Image (spheres, rainbow, N blue to C red):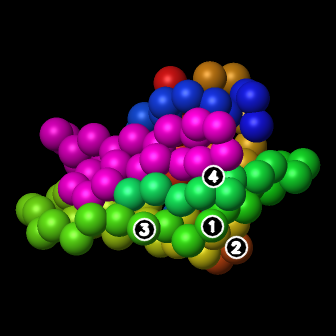
């Protein structure tokens, strides 16, 4: 978990192996802190407890978030972020300065410090 600790910015959405950048002006972040994740999905914020790493799999408890409505770009990014994290388990791959989180359905997020 140590290599993941701290704040990360989502700089790409992964679908079918392709990475798409976030729309201009939309910012999403994920922070890993002492067994917990904090998420800002582009509009709403949330968190989950019980974050554990086993090999290259991260498992965490239910993700709880605020429920504000934002513009279409922010909501599209938020939907992608919460879809990836919403199952409570992702695999991760470190590639230089980037980390890719992927859920069981193959949807993913590329993160950078």
**Left or right: 31 with respect to 53?**
left
Picture quadrant where residue 78 is located: bottom left
Q: Position of residue 88 (x, y in %)?
A: 63, 69
Residue 61 tag number: 1
The answer to whether the residue labelled 1 contacts the one labelled 3, judged by CB atoms less than 8 Å apart, is: no
**Position of the N terminus by quadrant:** top right
**Left or right: 111 with respect to 45?**
right
**Left or right: 94 with respect to 106?**
right
Task: Residue at 63% x, 31% y: name it.
Answer: 5
Q: Position of residue 33 (x, y in %)?
A: 59, 37
Residue 64 tag number: 3
Q: Position of residue 55 (x, y in %)?
A: 90, 49
Picture quadrant where residue 99 is located: top right
Location of residue 80 with respect to 96 vertically, above or below: below
Residue count near mark 2 (Cα–Cα under 10 Å), binned few <14, some 14–19, many ≥20? few
Residue 101 tag number: 4
**Left or right: 48 with respect to 88?**
left
The answer to whether the residue labelled 1 contacts the one labelled 4, judged by CB atoms less than 8 Å apart, is: no
Check disc 3 and report its element: helix, strand or loop. Answer: strand
Whether residue 13 is visible to the viewer of this picture, yes or no, is: no
Q: Which residue is mark 2?
A: 104
Check disc 4 and report its element: helix, strand or loop. Answer: strand
Magenta residue span:
19-45
Check disc 1 and report its element: helix, strand or loop. Answer: loop
The answer to whether the residue labelled 1 contacts the one labelled 2, judged by CB atoms less than 8 Å apart, is: no
């Amino acid at each position: 978990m140590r290599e993941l600790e701290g704040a990360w910015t989502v700089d790409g959405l992964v679908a079918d192996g392709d990475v798409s950048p976030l729309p201009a002006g939309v910012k999403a972040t994920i922070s890993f802190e002492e067994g917990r994740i904090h998420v800002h999905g582009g509009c709403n914020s949330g968190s989950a407890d019980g974050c554990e790493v086993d090999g290259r799999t991260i498992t965490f408890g239910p993700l709880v978030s605020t429920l504000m409505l934002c513009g279409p770009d922010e909501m599209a990014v938020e939907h992608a972020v919460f879809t990836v994290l919403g199952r409570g388990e992702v695999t991760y791959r470190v590639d230089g300065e980037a980390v890719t989180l992927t859920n069981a359905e193959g949807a993913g997020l590329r993160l950078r410090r």
